[in-house]
Amino acid sequence: MDYIEQLKGRFISIMQWDDCHALFDKLNRNPSDWYLYDTLKVAPKVVTNANQFINTLSDIKKSH
């Protein structure tokens, strides 16, 4: 199942930086079976591997 098929739930945004940091920590502890989606590109068809996922999260944290 691709990203668009999986995306049928509800999305709630993060309200505070502490929440964002807590979310990233939780995601880093559970890096498997996630889609990474750059909204300026085509939606992914497969989940990313754990190492790529962790590296991408690290890059996001560095840039913000």
Image (cartoon, rainbow, N blue to C red):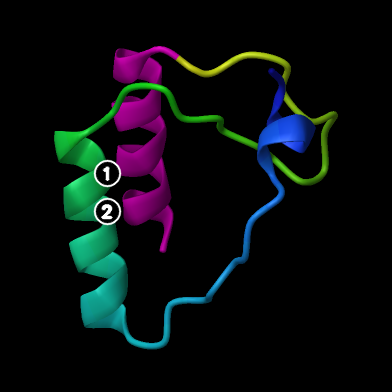
Q: Secondary structure at mark 1?
A: helix
Image position, residue 14 (x, y; %): 43, 77
Q: Which residue is mark 1?
A: 27
The answer to whether the residues at label 1 and label 2 have Cβ atoms under 8 Å apart is yes
52 relative to 26, above or below: above
Per the picture, the main secondary structure of the magenta-coloured stretch is helix
Q: Residue furthest bottom?
A: 15
Tell me which residue sits at (29%, 29%) in the image.
54
Tell me which residue sits at (63%, 14%) in the image.
46
Classify mark 1: residues with Cα within 10 Å, few (<14), some (14-19) or many (20+): some
Q: Is residue 5 left or right of residue 64?
A: right
Q: Amino acid at mark 1?
A: Leu
Image quadrant assignment for residue 28: top left
Q: Which residue is mark 2?
A: 24
3 or 63, which lies in front? 3
**Magenta span:** 49-64
Tell me which residue sits at (59%, 67%) in the image.
11
Image position, residue 60 (x, y; %): 42, 49
In the rendered view of the protein, which quadrant contains the C terminus? Answer: bottom left
